[in-house]
Image: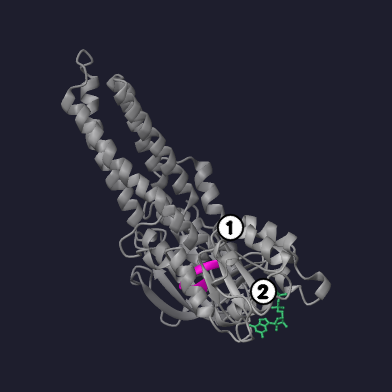
């Protein structure tokens, strides 16, 4: 494999920048561009050591750097690797990368270091995929679940399921060699037991995706209410208090700004907050019509009402809208003299969750967070013992495997010959191997790593 190089730190101004090199010629390239303060041959330099010195081009010092050495196979990619720690900023780091390229390295593609770690067998595909999850994480819990996957918890579970299947498959294959016999009863029992076991494990994993999805994508939340009920005040109260992460998807309009807030470690993805913000103009304030669209898309609706005024026709329409959805009713402006209360039947008929708040004075915001945690069982997700599926690719593969399990069950019930049954059992094994990457096409691999950032 070629020797690759890339800038691994984020672009922009920063204290330090890192250029990474991996491959056979790493140390040769470093020798050409790096002049350490204390010279030593590469054989004398141990892996995991740092050397201090200068990057040199045509006798001129480009920067003062620290170079770390990793010797194959003990590196991220399992190849010889170096990381050049230079001063940050836009110029120096680029310059050092250019020097590496001039001296024989190829520019790394996005994710290529991690791809090599996978291709060289240091990590499996599920572990490699978790690297990108950890980097892109928007909350503590997402990091936690990513790190667990990186450590191999999911892979171990998949491997143990595969082993269970394989043990039974080996016995079944023996019977195929003696086709004159029917499937012995003991063997049918063995297959049924295995299938039952594997099914329950896979179903558990498939189900964990509900929580996994929440952790990864956030709970899509719409804040709705008629004009002047207090939507933007609530938004401000939430955003001021929480660490909000605003992701502006490149090349799109303000309308698609996604805003994430962390509620007890789980991201809420606020829908169309740009729309709420644009409401300084009285005429432009969001009407109920727009709320309908938002409500349809949301996993959670926070419906806000001005408790100091009688419910209007518009309020009643909103109440109708949330009837069949996960919703929280907020009675806002409780600092004023209130007219409607949580005992109001019209409210109680629409939602089981009614809270009193004052968005302006930030009263009751904590209760709102607790309510959300309670509704989505956020406190019950057990991060220590539970393996969570957060990746849709994994989820789809598990669903496919479960389909094949049903086929095995059907075939057994219909007294199909053993060789047919083993075909489906092998399919299950094949499915599971796609998660860890023993059986995936190059296209799938390329697709996965293309989503990585440069230098990882
Ligand atoms: P929106 O149109 O739903 O976004 O409502 P705003 O957040 O713009 O609020 C409308 C008006 O109600 C503003 O003048 C706010 O200051 C006021 N308001 C919002 N929340 C409260 C509250 O809790 N108490 C009081 N007294 N006024 C509030």
- Pinpoint residue 3: horizontal percent, then vertical percent: 50, 57
- Residue 318 appears in which quarter of the rendering? bottom right
Residue 123 higher or lower than 196, as above or below = below
Q: Is residue 123 left or right of residue 107?
A: left
Residue depicted at 58% across the width and 75% down the height: 341
- The label on residue 122 is none
Viewer-proximal residue among 324 and 249: 324
Within 10 angstroms of label 2, few (less than 14), some, or many (20 or more) residues? many
Principal SS element in the magenta part?
strand
Q: Secondary structure at mark 2?
A: helix
Residue furthest out toward the left:
186
Nearer-N-terminus badge (1/2): 2
Residue depicted at 30% across the width and 61% down the height: 385
- Pinpoint residue 271: horizontal percent, then vertical percent: 64, 64
Q: Depth-wise, is mark 1 or mark 2 nearer the camera?
A: 1
- Which residues make up the magenta segment? 262-268
Viewer-proximal residue among 302 and 18: 302
Viewer-proximal residue among 449 and 256: 256
Residue depicted at 64% across the width and 55% down the height: 296
Residue 202 higher or lower than 236, as above or below = above
Viewer-proximal residue among 350 and 398: 350
Q: Secondary structure at mark 1?
A: loop
Q: CA distance from mark 1 to mark 2?
A: 20 Å
- The label on residue 323 is 1
Q: Is residue 346 left or right of residue 190?
A: right
Q: Within 8 Å: ligand 1 and the Cβ of disc 1?
A: no
- Pinpoint residue 13: horizontal percent, then vertical percent: 62, 79
Ligand 1 positioned in quadrant: bottom right
Q: Residue 388: say if magenta.
A: no
Q: Which residue is mark 2?
A: 231
- Residue 361 appears in which quarter of the rendering? bottom right
């Amino acid at each position: 494999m070629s020797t690759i190089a890339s800038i691994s730190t984020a672009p922009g101004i920063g204290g330090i920048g890192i250029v990474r090199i991996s491959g056979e010629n790493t140390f040769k390239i470093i020798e050409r561009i790096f002049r350490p303060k204390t010279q030593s041959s590469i054989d004398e330099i141990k892996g995991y050591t740092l050397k201090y010195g200068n990057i040199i081009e045509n006798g001129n010092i480009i920067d003062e750097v620290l170079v770390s050495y990793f010797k194959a196979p003990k590196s991220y990619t399992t190849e010889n690797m170096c990381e050049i720690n230079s001063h940050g900023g836009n110029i120096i780091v680029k310059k050092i990368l250019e020097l590496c390229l001039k001296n024989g390295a190829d520019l790394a593609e996005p994710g290529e270091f991690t791809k090599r770690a996978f291709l060289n067998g240091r990590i499996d595909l599920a572990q490699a995929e978790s690297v990108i999850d950890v980097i892109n994480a928007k909350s503590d819990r997402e990091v936690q679940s990513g790190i667990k996957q990186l450590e191999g918890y999911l892979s171990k579970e998949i491997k143990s399921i595969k082993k269970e299947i394989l043990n039974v498959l080996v016995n079944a294959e023996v019977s195929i060699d003696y086709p004159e016999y029917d499937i012995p009863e003991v063997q049918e029992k063995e297959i049924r037991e295995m299938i039952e076991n594997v099914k329950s494990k896979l179903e558990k994993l498939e189900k964990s995706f509900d929580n996994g999805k929440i952790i990864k994508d956030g709970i899509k939340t719409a804040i709705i209410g008629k004009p002047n009920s207090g939507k933007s005040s609530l938004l401000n109260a939430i955003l001021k208090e929480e660490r909000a992460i605003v992701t502006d998807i490149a090349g799109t309009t303000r309308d698609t700004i996604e805003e994430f807030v962390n509620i007890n470690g789980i991201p809420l993805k606020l829908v169309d907050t740009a729309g709420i913000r644009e409401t300084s103009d009285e005429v432009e304030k969001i009407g109920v019509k727009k709320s309908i669209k938002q409500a349809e898309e949301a996993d959670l609706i926070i419906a806000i009402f001005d408790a100091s005024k009688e419910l209007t026709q518009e309020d009643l329409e909103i109440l109708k809208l949330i009837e069949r959805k996960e919703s929280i009713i907020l009675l806002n402006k409780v600092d004023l003299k209130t007219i409607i209360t949580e005992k109001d039947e019209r409210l109680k008929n629409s939602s089981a969750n009614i809270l009193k708040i004052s968005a302006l004075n930030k009263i009751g915001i904590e209760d709102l967070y607790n309510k959300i945690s309670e509704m989505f069982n956020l406190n019950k997700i057990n991060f220590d013992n539970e393996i969570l599926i957060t990746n849709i690719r994994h989820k789809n593969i598990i669903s496919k495997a479960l389909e094949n399990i049903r086929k095995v069950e059907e075939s057994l019930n219909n007294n199909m010959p053993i060789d047919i049954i083993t075909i489906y059992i092998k399919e299950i094994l094949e499915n599971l191997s796609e998660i860890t990457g023993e059986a995936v096409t190059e296209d799938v691999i390329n697709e996965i790593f293309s989503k990585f950032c440069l230098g990882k």
